[in-house]
Image: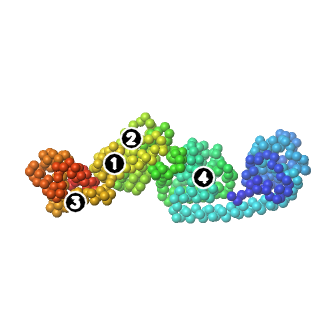
């Protein structure tokens, strides 16, 4: 950062010639020097604005320790960068009362043991400050042009926040009004370190009207608005070992916050939904370096993970929206009103993921059934709700989510009547439905049933229905004939035709098993209701 600090001034030749010694405020030498002010007044505070390095010979300093302490308090209250006292004219050594007062106020006190020309100090330091201010103006123009370019090409919020973090070399967090960390851009520290106990820490820092330092941790905070009202805020966190924020940090954060505000003016970016989706996908594929990082990221979005039962749910939906509202947006709006804390996000174009946090002693089935029935009422019967096993550790969510996805893949139209589905609901029809895109399954169906399908197509017959009835009756011809409404003789003739076409023996249990699997797979491939490949069952 192109700003002069007290430590920088002490390294200048014009100062080192005076053999400077730091007598107090050693930990505050990284303060920015905004200007140099030479004064011998007893009440200089009325001429100062803060950030000045005050030079004095100490000539007018009072001898009374109380008045000397009041002099130091004035300087500290106005926020000067430091006090430089030249020895030799008034003092042969720094008075203990002056040193003690500066230490109490943590004000840098520099003693020059050899005389220097103050005019040379002011000229040198002011020239460097003006150069730094010119550099700041050039940097400000560059930063403004960069964020303007990002805004004009419609950059996403993640890129805007990351750009701010890269420019400032500090972590930057975008959060909403309820203190959920929507985006966290790293710079120098991991997400885990930045987001530790995030909601609690965030509430201790107030939101100023414009970028300013706030809170006990010294965060730099800038508001992010939407159409005249507050949406959230952008927060820059100081590095533990780095210097405090300077005007360039403030300028970067203000430009980034303005770009985010403009982004919200162009529409209603689903930043919260994208944040939820990102965490859910990272959990599904376990992209975290540790369980702690995963826990902190989830908790930063408002999901309690300790002392709760975590329930992964996958929702498949054929319609992306209904009345302009997507399944994901509908769930995100409805769940909080019912008191359910959850992450809700898109896993794919037609699949929504939920990770619910429920009380360990509560039953999850009523909650899921209520969610499922609400979705089917709004978006139709084609909505499939698949539930993975509940877990108590976030590290176990990945396995449970994958099981829920496997269940969702297996649920076909034949099973749409259930409100929700779990792994135990996956039988042979569901298994074959999940394998419907496998070429080997398709070839198997063709080898087993191809001739029968072709015969029905050419002759308008329904031998497939006859075969299904026979197999469902476990080979009992009388029951099967009655089910399809045929005489036993007519039914027997159809069975002989099937045996001839397929070159099989229907009396063989093994042969019937093969045909049963093939016919179930055929129904899965063609989306028919199980047991009735050509429509509804006869009355």
Q: Mark 4 to mark 3: distance in Å?
A: 63 Å
Q: Nearer the viewer, residue 144 or 518?
A: 518
Mark 2 vs mark 4: which is more N-terminal?
A: 4
| Numbered disc 1: secondary structure | helix
Q: Mark 4 to mark 1: distance in Å?
A: 43 Å
Q: Nearer the viewer, residue 13 or 469?
A: 469
Q: Badge 4, how many Cα within 10 Å: few under 14, some, many 20+? A: many
Q: Nearer the viewer, residue 93 or 495?
A: 495
Give how far across and how far down residue 311 sits, in percent.
42, 43
The residue at which mark 1 appears reads as 376
Mark 4 vs mark 1: which is more N-terminal?
A: 4
The residue at which mark 4 appears reads as 171
Q: Are marks 2 and 4 in contact (CB under 8 Å)?
A: no
- Residue 538 position (above or below residue 308): below
Which residue does the image show at 60% across and 56% down from the upper left? 165
- In the picture as drawn, the residue positioned furthest to the top comes out as 361
Q: Are marks 1 and 2 in contact (CB under 8 Å)?
A: no
Which residue does the image show at 40% across and 56% down from the upper left? 349
The residue at which mark 2 appears reads as 367
- Residue 443 position (above or below residue 78): below
Give how far across and how far down residue 192 sits, in percent.
56, 47
The residue at which mark 3 appears reads as 450
Give how far across and how far down residue 275 sits, in percent.
49, 52
Which residue does the image show at 54% across and 62% down from the upper left? 151
> How many marks can you see?
4
455 with respect to 365 (left or right):
left
Q: Badge 3, how many Cα within 10 Å: few under 14, some, many 20+? A: some
């Amino acid at each position: 950062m192109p700003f002069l600090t007290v430590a920088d001034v002490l390294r200048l030749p014009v100062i080192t010639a005076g053999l400077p010694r730091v007598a107090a405020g050693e930990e505050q030498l990284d303060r920015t020097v905004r200007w140099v002010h030479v004064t011998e007044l007893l009440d200089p505070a009325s001429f100062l604005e803060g950030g000045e390095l005050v030079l004095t010979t100490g000539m007018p300093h009072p001898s009374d320790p109380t008045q000397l302490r009041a002099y130091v308090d004035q300087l500290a209250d106005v926020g000067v960068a430091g006090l430089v006292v030249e020895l030799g004219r008034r003092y042969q050594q720094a008075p203990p009362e002056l040193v003690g007062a500066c230490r109490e106020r943590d004000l840098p006190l520099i003693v020059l043991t050899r005389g220097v020309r103050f005019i040379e100090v002011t000229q040198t330091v002011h020239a460097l400050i003006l150069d730094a201010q010119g550099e700041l103006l050039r940097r400000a123009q560059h930063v403004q042009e960069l964020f303007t370019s990002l805004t004009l090409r419609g950059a996403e919020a993640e890129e805007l926040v990351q750009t701010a973090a890269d420019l400032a070399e500090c972590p930057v967090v975008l959060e909403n009004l309820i203190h959920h960390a929507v985006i966290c851009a790293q710079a120098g520290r991991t997400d885990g370190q930045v987001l530790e106990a995030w909601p609690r820490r965030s509430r201790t820092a107030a939101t100023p009207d414009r970028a300013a330092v706030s809170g006990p941790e010294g965060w730099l905070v800038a508001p992010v608005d939407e159409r005249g009202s507050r949406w959230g805020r952008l927060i820059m966190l100081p590095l533990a070992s780095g210097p405090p924020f300077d005007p360039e940090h403030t300028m970067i954060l203000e430009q980034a916050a303005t770009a985010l505000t403009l982004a919200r003016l162009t529409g209603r970016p689903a930043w919260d939904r994208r944040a939820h989706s990102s965490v859910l996908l990272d959990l599904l594929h376990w992209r975290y370096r540790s369980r702690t990082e995963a826990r902190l990221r989830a908790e930063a979005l408002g999901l309690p993970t300790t002392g709760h039962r975590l329930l992964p749910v996958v929702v498949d939906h054929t319609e992306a929206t209904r009345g302009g509202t997507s399944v994901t947006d509908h769930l995100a709006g409805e769940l909080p009103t019912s008191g359910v804390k959850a992450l809700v996000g898109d896993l794919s174009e037609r699949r929504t993921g939920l990770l619910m946090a429920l009380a360990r002693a509560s039953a999850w089935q009523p909650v899921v059934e209520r969610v499922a029935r609400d979705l089917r009422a709004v978006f139709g019967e084609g909505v499939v709700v698949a539930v993975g096993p509940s877990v108590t550790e976030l590290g176990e969510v990945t396995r449970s989510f994958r099981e829920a996805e496997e269940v969702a893949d297996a649920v076909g139209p034949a099973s749409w009547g259930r409100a929700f589905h779990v792994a135990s609901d996956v039988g042979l029809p569901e298994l074959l439905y999940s394998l419907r895109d496998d070429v080997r399954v398709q070839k198997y169906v063709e080898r087993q049933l191809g001739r029968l399908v072709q015969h029905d197509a050419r002759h308008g017959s329904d031998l497939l229905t006859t075969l299904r009835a026979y197999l469902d009756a476990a080979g009992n011809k009388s029951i099967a004939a009655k089910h399809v409404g045929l005489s036993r003789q007519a039914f027997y003739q159809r069975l002989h035709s099937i045996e001839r076409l397929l070159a099989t023996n229907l009396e063989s249990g093994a042969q019937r098993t093969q045909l049963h699997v093939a016919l179930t797979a055929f129904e899965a491939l063609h989306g028919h209701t199980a047991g009735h490949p050509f429509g509804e069952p006869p009355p």
